[in-house]
Image (cartoon, rainbow, N blue to C red):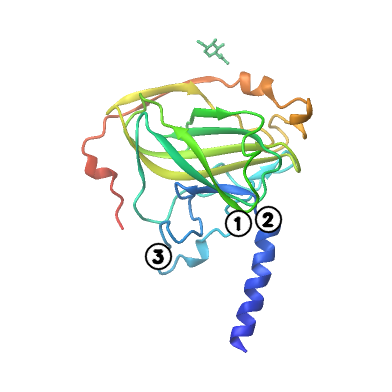
């Protein structure tokens, strides 16, 4: 009886997942994601696992979650990326909404300030098969400062509800010790009524929000020198 009940519950939760799920990081690990290869919850943290990690953070009508969705990861080892390295990131794809515009941004102050390090406008994720793990190359700037950082994948989808996605992963960058990084601040469109609206079906000749991306403000962030590499290793 117990087995049957569990199977029914599992089936129900899979349906719920399918209804809500869209795209998130899989590598590097998204904060509180449900992946077995990622940092795992502690004894009293199992209810914190985010089985809905692929869902958007809101629509143009309503903000449902803060940028990054979660403020921290479960304790565990963060991947280290070298400045200048091209990382094969992996996205957990449910549906691709016929693509959209992606921004990848780094923050060294836990999401207070962000610098965009890569853009892919209009058809980003358009060729990602449904229900797949999809590899996307991401190049870390050659002059990126060293230190613990948050990598944020930000996406405005082409089709469907006017949504904003943001999937955050805790990483360590090994680059210039005590440096700065310049670029533009990310655009958070389709994220509450006061945010810019990027309309639907942008790939069919419509407005895909170019004017908003072009207007992103320039930003330079300064990262203090790291005293010892050991301080990057998180405690388990
Ligand atoms: C950012 O800097 C570039 C180059 O200096 C400049 O052309 C551009 O207008 C600036 N963007 C904004 C939004 O101020």
Instruction: Answer with the quarter of the image where residue 150 lies.
Output: top left
Residue 180, position in %: x, y?
36, 23
Q: Secondary structure at mark 1?
A: loop
Q: Position of residue 67 (x, y in %)?
A: 56, 41
Q: Earlier in the sequence, mark 3 or mark 2?
A: 2
- Mark 2 crowdedness (10 Å alpha carbons): few <14, some 14-19, many ≥20: some
Q: Nearer the viewer, residue 122 or 114?
A: 122
Looking at the rendered image, the disc whose residue lies closer to the viewer, 3 or 1, is 1
Q: Residues within 10 Å of mark 1 (few under 14, many from 20)?
A: some
> Which class describes the residues within 10 Å of circle 3: few (<14), some (14-19), or many (20+)?
few
**Numbered marks: total:** 3
| Residue drawn at point x = 62 percent, y = 89 percent | 1
Q: What distance separates the C-alpha of mark 2 from that of mark 1?
A: 7 Å
Mark 3 falls on what kind of element? loop
Give the image quarter of residue 229: top left
Local secondary structure at mark 2: helix
Residue named by callout 1: 52
Q: Are marks 2 and 1 in contact (CB under 8 Å)?
A: yes
Question: From the viewer's perspective, is residue 87 above or below residue 48?
Answer: above
Are circles 3 and 1 on residues that touch, CB within 8 Å? no
Q: Circles 3 and 2: CB distance less than 8 Å?
A: no
Question: Looking at the rendering, in which quadrant would you find the C terminus?
Answer: bottom left
- Label 2 vs 1, first from the N-terminus: 2
Relative to the observer, which residue lies in front, 59 or 116? 116
Mark seen at residue 20: 2
Pick whichever of labels 3 and 1 is earlier in the sequence. 3
Residue located beneath label 3 in the image? 42
Q: CA distance from mark 3 to mark 2?
A: 26 Å
Quadrant assignment, res 187 = top right
Q: Residue at x 60, y 47 (%)?
A: 23
How far apart in space, not on screen, are marks 3 and 1 (Cα)?
19 Å
User: Any atom of ligand 1 within 8 Å of the CB at mark 1?
Assistant: no
């Amino acid at each position: 009886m117990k087995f049957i009940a569990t199977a029914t519950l599992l089936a129900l939760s899979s349906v719920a997942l399918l209804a809500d799920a869209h795209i998130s990081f899989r590598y590097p690990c998204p904060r509180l994601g449900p992946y077995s290869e990622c940092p795992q919850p502690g004894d009293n943290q199992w209810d914190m696992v985010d089985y809905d990690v692929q869902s958007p953070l809101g629509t143009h009508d309503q903000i449902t979650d803060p940028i990054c969705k979660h403020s921290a990861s479960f304790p565990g080892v963060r991947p280290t990326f070298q400045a200048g390295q091209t990382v094969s990131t992996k996205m957990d794809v449910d549906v691709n909404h016929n693509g959209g515009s992606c921004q990848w941004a780094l923050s060294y102050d836990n999401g207070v300030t962000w610098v965009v390090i890569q853009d892919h406008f209009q058809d980003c994720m358009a060729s990602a098969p449904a229900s797949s793990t999809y590899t996307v190359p991401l190049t870390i700037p050659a002059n990126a400062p060293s230190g613990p950082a948050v990598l944020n994948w930000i996406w405005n989808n082409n089709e469907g509800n006017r949504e904003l996605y943001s999937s955050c992963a805790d990483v360590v960058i090994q680059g210039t010790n005590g440096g700065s990084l310049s670029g533009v601040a990310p655009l958070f469109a389709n994220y509450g009524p006061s945010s810019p609206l990027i309309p639907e079906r942008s790939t069919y000749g419509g407005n895909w929000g170019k004017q908003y991306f072009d207007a992103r403000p320039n930003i330079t962030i300064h990262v203090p020198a790291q005293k010892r590499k050991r301080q990057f290793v998180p405690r388990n």
